[in-house]
Image (spheres, grey):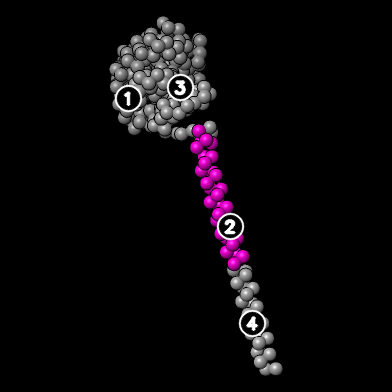
Amino acid sequence: MAAAAASGGSSASSRPRCRRRRAFTTASFVAVSAVAAAASLQCRCSDLLPAFARKHVYAVGLRELKARLRHEELSQEEETETLSRLREAYDEEMNKWGNRKQWEKTLNFLKEMQDATYEPGLSHYIVAMRACGEKNKDWFRAISILQEMKELQMASDTEPYCVAMSSCRQAMQWHLVMDIFSDMRRKQVPDTRETYGEALHACSLTGQWQEAMALLWEMDRDGPEPKSFEFNRAMDACFVAKEDDWFDELEEEAAERGFEIDRFD
């Protein structure tokens, strides 16, 4: 009886261990199955990734994009889209180095685009002009780029002229600012507030009060309407030329229009 009880107790005590063993085995099997499934999925994804990337995920770096054009067989649509992205990447790189005043790298990128027939656009030439002229005060290179744009018939817009004028103004080449302004008008490129402002700024620092007055009158007649900045630059030109009567007249007109006077002494 006692032996039977002992045997029964032993059997009863072994059942929980068996259940725990079965539970552990089941959990292990589930874990191994999950790992195997994940590995299988990863393997399938890795097989699909190159095709997906080629179709949908475009490289963002210049090196990768250029390699893609050279080595991969692309459809016409893929090639067009890759070229578009490549031009954007060049624009980003040129802007980055231009802002760091590394004009040599900016020009190298422009030349690289030209040599590889990647067809640099207006934005690439503008970035190169800004890097040379506005960032590095190399007005001569800025004008050279403008001349190249004219030859390529890419200078029908106001922006390249405005950048060239700004480059010359910052390098204190006042007469060139007015020359570019005159050239722009001969080619019937529309005037803007920015080009008027650059021309008036040049007049103000060289005392060309008659030209300044004429520009101010043009703006008042044809637009854009002159604001405080334009009145102040015309007044500065009169001040430098010691044209006190005209200075006083402009000061009264500006005051009537509610503009603040900030002339230098």
Of the image marks 1 and 4, the number of the one nearer the N terminus: 4
The single residue placed furthest to the bottom in the displayed view is 2
Q: Amino acid at mark 4?
A: Ser
Question: Where is residue 243 shown, x and y percent of the image?
Answer: 34, 13
Q: Which mark is residue 108?
A: 1
Q: Which residue is mark 4?
A: 13
Question: Where is residue 116 shown, x and y percent of the image?
Answer: 37, 21
Determine whether label 1 and label 4 are within 8 Å by CB.
no
* Residue at the (41%, 5%) spot, across then down: 186
- Tell which tag, 2 or 1, sits nearer the viewer: 2
Determine whether label 2 and label 3 are within 8 Å by CB.
no
* Relative side of 19 to 97, left or right: right
- Tell which tag, 2 or 3, sits nearer the viewer: 2
The CA span between labels 3 and 1 is 41 Å
Residue 8's quadrant in the figure? bottom right
Residue 23's quadrant in the figure? bottom right
Residue 38: say if magenta.
yes
The CA span between labels 4 and 2 is 31 Å
* Residue at the (43%, 22%) spot, across then down: 123
| Secondary structure of the residue carrying numbered label 3 | helix
Q: Which residue is mark 3?
A: 228
146 or 170, which is in the foreground? 146
* Residue at the (46%, 18%) spot, across then down: 193
Of the image marks 3 and 1, the number of the one nearer the N terminus: 1
The CA span between labels 2 and 3 is 76 Å
Q: Amino acid at mark 1?
A: Asn
| Secondary structure of the residue carrying numbered label 1 | helix
The magenta region covers 25-54
Determine whether label 2 and label 1 are within 8 Å by CB.
no
The CA span between labels 4 and 3 is 98 Å
